[in-house]
Amino acid sequence: MISLGFIAEGVAQGGASGGYDPLLPGLILLLPLLGFAANGVLALMAGSRAADRIRGGGDGAAIAGPDGKKPFTHTLPTWIGPGVLLGAFILVAINFFRMLGVELTEPVIRSYWSWMPTGTLSVDAAIQLDQLSMIMMMVITGVGFLIHMFSVGYMKEDPGYPRYFAYLNLFVFFMLVLVMGANFPVMFVGWEGVGLCSYLLIGFWFQDREKADAGKKAFIVNRVGDFGLLMAMFILFATFGTLDYGAIFQQAPELFVYGGAAVTAVTLFLLLGAVGKSAQIPLYVWLPDAMAGPTPVSALIHAATMVTAGVYLVARSSVLFAMAPASAAAVATIGALTALFAATIALKQYDIKKVLAYSTVSQLGFMFMGVGVGAYAAGVFHLMTHAFFKALLFLGAGAVIHSMHHALHSTHKDWDAQDMRNMGGLKRFMPATWITMWIATLAIAGIWPFAGFFSKDEIIWYVGTAGAFSGLYVVLWGMALAAAVLTAFYMTRMMVMTFHGPNRTGEDEAKHLHEAPLNMTIPLGVLAVLSVFGGWINVPGSVRESFFGGFGLLPMSAWLDSWLAPVTAGADAIRMAELGAYADVSPVGGGHVVWGAIATTMALVVVILTARHFLAREVQPAHIDGEPESGIGKVLYNKWYVDEFYDRIIVRPILATSRFCWRVIDRVVIDGTVNAVGAVSKGVGWFGSLFQTGQINTYAFIIALSALVVLGAFIF
Amino acid sequence: MIEILFYIFAAVAVGSAFGVVLQKNPVGSLLFMVATLASLAGIFVLFEAHFLAAIQIIVYAGAIMVLFLFVIMLLNLGHDYRRDIQVGVGMVLAFATTGLIAGILVRQFGGAETSPMLAAFPGPEGMDALLAEQGIIGAIARPLFTDYVIVFELTGILLLVALVGAIAIAKRRV
Amino acid sequence: MTGFLDAVGFGEWILHALIWLPLVGIGAVLLAPEERAKEIAFGWTTGLFVLSLGLWWSFDPAGPLFQHMSSTEWIGAFGISYALGIDGISLFMILLTTFTMPIAILGAFKYVKERQRAFYALMLLLQTGIVGVFATMDLFLFYVFFELTLVPMYFIVGIWGGERRIYAAVKFFLYTALGSLLMLVGILYLYWQAQLNLGYPSFHFFDLLGTPLTLTEQLWLFVAFGLAFAIKVPLFPFHTWLPDAHVEAPTPGSVVLAAVLLKLGAYGFLRFVLPLFPEASAHPTVVMIMLTLGVIGIIYAAWVAAVQPDAKKLVAYTSVAHMGFVLIGIFALTTNGLQGGLIVMISHGISTGALFLILGMLYERRHTREIEEFGGIAKVAPLLATALVITAMASIGVPGTSGFVGEFLALLGTFERYPVLAFLAATGVIFAAYYMLPMVQKILFNPLDREENRAMKDLSGREIAVLSPLVGLMLLIGVFPGPILDRMEPGVQAIIEWVDEGAAGGALMEEAKGPAGVREAPPPAVPTTAELGTSAMDRIEATAELIHGSAAQREWIRVAIGDQD
Amino acid sequence: MLVEALILSAILFVVGMLGVLVRRNAIIIFLCVELMLNAVNLSFVALSRFMGIEGQIYVFFVMTVAAAEAAVGLAIIIAIFRHYETVNVNNFNLLKW
């Protein structure tokens, strides 16, 4: 049914493809799916074998067979898992470079089959290739491949190794569906699919109740967002009669009123979806818990790709958001609030992954600010650079945890391998990890010339210049700056506590601390290179001419902006028409270059001061240090008690209502009514049985009386 | 003449009917019943139903009533003088009900002779002609063995079943 | 394929075969030795399924609305005919039935250990009843088959059920019988009205279609029919029989109950209530009531499901929620809504059937249904865990599974007309995760801390054979629902147009009757109403003449009813 | 004379009914039922005088049925008497439940 030729061609839709002819776009999707299928079969085989061992009284954790060698179920995924990703990445890269060479103004659409034809609705299983999806695909398959490679080293001793790669491949498949879908429903397939994979991977070690809970929480919270997305689709369908991107974005300026209720509702629902997936206030709570999954998963799903889907969604629907200024402002506001709020929590976390998780939430807030003020390219830019350095940070943290775990395991010490207070001085043992993570830290802190400087600075700049449209953005600008400062602080704090100072692991344990193997450090290295140079692809002209751009030495100027221009053209045009161009100065004066200098200086100062502060401080291991007792520290440590708050006002009331519905309404009211009807029938029967005396006279009398009645009826 | 006879028979029938109901002794009731049956047989004769009058005496008064008597004697109820008539409210209600029924029936039957519905039928003259032609036995037997032959046969089966049933029920289980 | 089917005259005998061959199978099962009964029943139903697959090809999506029509007089005096025929909607209901039956029976192999012959005979009887309901075009026949499904189910729950089986069976029977008796009254009234309109008696769907009824009449009839179907669906607040019946029923009983029997109600709404009482069905108040109840059902059932300690009861409540989606899809009266509702029906049949089968398998292993008794099962039974996760995902409507297509379309269709209700109903998507995931977690995940669970066996070959077609179909329908939607579309469009045209009896109804060509008005077997005259006396006189023919007796009757003229 | 006969039959009928209602002796109740039957017979006979011979045929059947009934009824009374040593119907409540 689906031949290779079909995969290659699909059915071309839409108008001019600008001479661009994608190479096997379907195969990009198919490869991870095949990888999933193969690894899935292996996982089931491995799982069944482990199950047999458990039934035989064993622990099921051992991988090696009787001959001491790993069975094929644990060797094949090593090649299949990363292999399909490499293949997909190569295909994406080929397509990317082919697209580079042509002027593509409209997305290239390939339709495979009619998915939901109902008569009035027609949804095709169609994919589209354009500049935005291409960038996303590059990030997904590129960073994805590196993380797969890292995982080979990280997960190789885990009994669920094949299952892990099955999930990971499936995730990549769904993520690609998300960014390649040519209409909202297909995108939604990927949207919920990645949620499902996230659920499975967070709960990968499902034997641990907390981890399984975390997966469940992620899924349910995400579903709140999915609900928003569903509603948005409904409104769009009711308005346009179609759910294809092309048709909707083309007709939106005609069928929607600028700033009208309909478009605002659509975009607010889209925002709800984005907020859920991208872990923004108020639905961010699942992401920190999601750190229960294996660390490479956190890197891939909860830092580099899936959580950025919300940003992608806003960028993809840029036309709609441009038409709904209120919603766009809401996006930016939520982004700013989240950026600042999550950064404050990160200040007081001791779990290395929790710090990174809140940092991710905070950085996603930056991206939201970017797309919220209409700087879609800037948002996507930060999405990309963030994918590099945050993946690097997570992988580095993974390497650290891996090493810590080994060390603690060697003496069976029950310390937490993720608590930074138990680390310290790791740079001696893990120099490669140390260096690469510092690069990433400087990048995320926004220090020139690392990638984060360019992307974050651009967002802050646009938020500031948007202050010309509304005073709100000036406030947001201030919050963004504050969040940037906090970022520099908590990241440095993390680095210093982890890698510097004296080692707190313990003497015996320290002997077992070691650098990660090559297949784990190579991805770190590649990502480090990207974290350095990744930002150079989108340096605005003014900056390029300044010191920060090497006085024009960079080969390109604002490449990403121009690359994404066809995608954001519609939105830009609307914004230009309705609001006008961005201002050229920040709210308090000063040009782009000036503020770039200010920002990087600020960040650098904070990094240095923080480093000095924490180097000077003596940190105690976790079991001595304990939790902060009081004050703002305690509140931050407990994450502003948001989880508890939600538990009180949402979870428990719903549970209580549920119980009430069951115990009272169902059991008492409805079933009670039913049983009451039964009881009434019985009562009537009992009353009738009173006449059933068994005495012939009574019966005779009743007969006579009835006869009298009948006769009487004849007369009267 | 016929009318006088009718009233005499009627008076006897009603009187002994009350006797049946009010007599304490079952045997007494039974004898009153025989009297009623006999006077009804007389009335049958007045209505030119000679055949029925005959079997009324032979079968009813003769056979069935004797069967009752046998049972009374078999169960030795003849000496049971205990009053078994219901008294009090039951009695009043019974009288009221039956009285009302009687009133309704009598009121309904009052206009029977002049009722237009009788016009469609042969009337006494037609019956006389029939009897003159076939005699009472013939008049009854002809439809009985033609139109009603199946019913007639079924009656035979009914009697057989009743016979078997009576034996089966009354037989003392060993 | 189509050519071959035509050559063997497939369309002419297939429906009769699907209805009556199960009864032949009963003979085979009853004659077989006790321990072979299940195999015969399985083989028989599988054969029937293979037979029914031909319908997929023989049913022409571009052809007339109703196909494979046939009609034979059954009780001529009352215009009752043995009339069969299917449209795209009944096509899939029949396929769902024939597909579910062998799977349910195969799933019962180990569960049912006593009186096996009787059990499988009843299952086959059930199949006759269900297929009959879906295939019949005659309202009286429909009622007969509708009631026929009650009897075997009553015994299946009552004999092979759990501890409170008698209570559950009686509750099931009384609840549903109450509704259908009201429907019988409605059917008879409709029949009477139709006879006045047609001039001859008939229970045929086409004859009843377009019977002129006042709005009041329609509303009353809607209540009579609607109550029967609402109980069957079940619609909140008539749902309380379902959890009891499901919990007590043996696994195959639950499977058939969830997969097919509940669909009878929704099918009844689609096939009879909407076309026959269009004005009432499109009446804003009625629609609002039905939609509101549907939405309440979705949310309420989800909430109640979430706090059930008994896994089977939980799944039973999810049925209520799913059928809520079906209801709103139907009563939104949009193409998308109806199509979605139908897909939800199919999807719910498959996924909930699979859930019950899996819970049954767990029950066979551990003899408990308490969710808390399990935990960490994924470790010892990875195949079962995989099946359960996929099924749960299909049940909560994750895209790529059948559940999503249905819920999405149903909600989309509802939103077109009733945005606020669709909004509320869509929250069911959230609550679906809220009830299903904790159950999955408590059964499959969490520590494997009970000794009994450590010894649990994974799926056997038979169980894999039971579950894999279901799981495969969930994914297949999720990805390629197109062929199904295409085939159902004409039927759905017809229903919408019938309702839109209302009681006027528009061209489409005539068209539907026309090309089918099978049905013509039979010559009147008894005097028509017109001949009978209108006054009660005239009718009695005429009737008396027919029966007796004697003027004298007529006079008697006249006197008897007190007519003194 | 028809009217008088019908009235007589009505009177006999209600007297029989009265007996059924007020007596407790099963045999006498039974006798009263016979009385009611006879009352009906009378009306049959009286009407047959005007309406044809069928009335007498019905009476014939009624008598047959009465005979059969008497046989079975008395057998039942005997069976009951053996069990309860009485024929007072107040002592029987077999019809209950």
Image: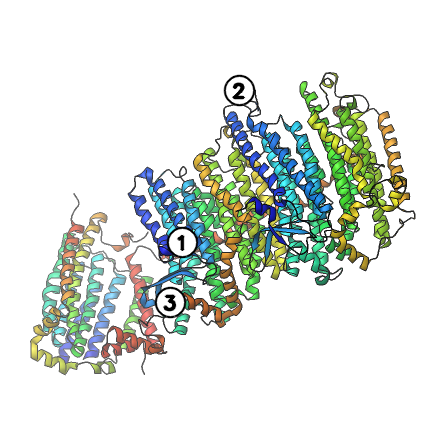
Per the image, the residue denoted by label 2 is: A66
Residue at the top extreme, as displayed: A508
User: Which of marks 3 and 1 precedes in the sequence?
Assistant: 1
Residue at the right extreme, as displayed: A589
| Label annotation for residue C519 | 3
Query: Element at badge 2?
Result: loop
Indicate the chain on which mark 3 is placed. Answer: C
Q: Residue at x 17, y 81 (%)?
A: B123
Q: Residue A630: in sight, yes or no?
A: no
**x and y, in percent, of residue A143 in the image:** 70, 37
10 Å crowding of disc 1: few (<14), some (14-19), many (20+): many
Q: Is residue A114 above or below residue A254?
A: above
Measure how far apart labels 1 and 3 are at the Cα level. 21 Å
Measure how far apart labels 1 and 2 are at the Cα level. 55 Å
Is residue C95 rendered to the left or right of residue C300?
A: left
10 Å crowding of disc 3: few (<14), some (14-19), many (20+): some
Q: Residue at x 34, y 44 (%)?
A: C118
Toward the viewer: C164 or B99? Answer: C164
Per the image, the residue denoted by label 1 is: C131
Q: Residue at x 76, y 39 (%)?
A: A386
Quarter of the rendering occupied by the C terminus of chain A: bottom left
Amino acid type for the residue under numbered disc 2: Pro
Amino acid type for the residue under numbered disc 1: Val
Amino acid type for the residue under numbered disc 3: Arg
Toward the viewer: D12 or C7? Answer: C7
**x and y, in percent, of residue A710 in the image:** 32, 70
